[in-house]
Amino acid sequence: MEYIKTTCKVNPDTEINREILIAELGNTGYESFAETEDSIEAYILKKNFNKDALVNLINYGFTEFRVALDSEDMPDLNWNEEWEKNYFQPLLLEERCLIRAPFHTTYPNAEYEIVIEPGMAFGTGNHETTSLMIGEILYEELDGKTVLDMGCGTGILTILASKRGAKNITSIDIDDWSIRSTKENALLNNISNIEIIHGGAEVIPDRKYDFIYANIQRNILLNDLPQYANALNTGGELVLSGFYLEDIRILEEKATKSELRLIRYKVNNEWVAAAFTF
């Protein structure tokens, strides 16, 4: 299959601006992404490429940042091989959880194995926040528990929670691509005890959860924290990630207003996962 690669440079180049850009590109037909130090590489089937739609998005779609881009035709390659070689290799986390793609043929044995169809660089366990959240799920006893996965992305946390014995999981994301990806990856991993919902905190069902995992950008966490607290069982845990160590105090202050208290946090390269309870 012939693809077009569009290299995008964001200014200011922040995590949230990258996430917004990737989500919008996904809505215009781009189906896979790779993040480099200074850019985002977005891939779309040549037959689906619409230059006018792309230019319109870049010129009028964003108010908080600007995007410079360059598109080029890509040769007809074995894309599974390219992903495996350049972007997504089997990853073993905590010596217990293996994350791999369906096309991987060589990988170590592990207690838990998660198969992810790669589409974005984040959501495959490579980002510090994802690995921190996986560590939290491996740390907790989830047998028979109810779980809410906010900002489910590829569904990686949902899948691990199910494999760890969670009774049922609700997975929520505002992005259409993420909803499709979670459904696809759940099937790949034979996971059926999940409810997948499109939207944000406003669509959280009117029920309580034993564990809530939210790996989302800091400002969204601050805004939605009261809704998370309202959905948490007494004695349950709310685990947040997607922010830096310097942000933990402002999140703790916000949590305190909902009668939550910080019980632990872990740091990986200045990124944080923090657990709260009543």
Image (cartoon, rainbow, N blue to C red):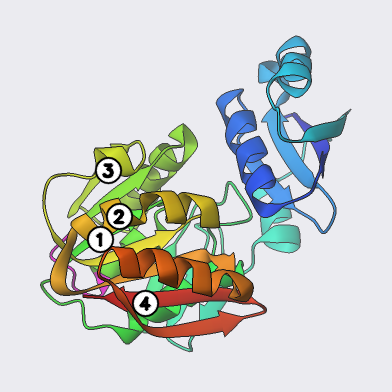
Q: Residue furthest top?
A: 52
Pointer 4 with pointer 1, Cβ within 8 A:
no
Q: Name the one closer to the observer, 251 or 114.
A: 251
Q: CA distance from mark 2 to mark 1?
A: 5 Å
Residue that mark 4 sits on: 275
Classed neighbour count for the residue bearing mark 1: other residues with Cα under 10 Å, few (<14), some (14–19), many (≥20): many
Could you tell whether 151 is left or right of 65 in the image? Answer: left
Q: Residue under label 2, please give it.
A: 226
Rendered location of residue 175, percent (x, y): 46, 36
Q: Amino acid at mark 1?
A: Ala
Identify which residue is drawn at 60% across, 35% down. Answer: 31
Q: Nearer the viewer, mark 3 or mark 2?
A: 2
The dominant secondary structure in magenta is loop
**Quarter location, residue 2:** top right
Q: Tag 2: residue type?
A: Pro
Which residue is depicted at the point 32% across and 44% down? 201
Left or right of 55, for residue 114:
left
| Helix, strand or loop under label 3 | strand
Mark closer to the observer (3, 4): 4
CA separation in Å, label 2 and label 4: 15 Å
Q: Which residues are magenta?
A: 163-168
The first of marks 2 and 4 along the sequence is: 2
Based on the picture, tell me whether residue 167 belongs to the magenta stretch: yes
Q: Which mark is residue 229?
A: 1
Q: Label 3 sits on what residue type? A: Ile
* Secondary structure category for the residue under label 1: helix
Q: Residue furthest bottom?
A: 95
Quadrant where the N terminus is found in the figure: top right
Q: Which of pointers 3 and 1 indicates the residue nearer the eye?
A: 1
User: Do the residues under discs 2 and 1 have CB atoms within 8 angstroms?
Assistant: yes
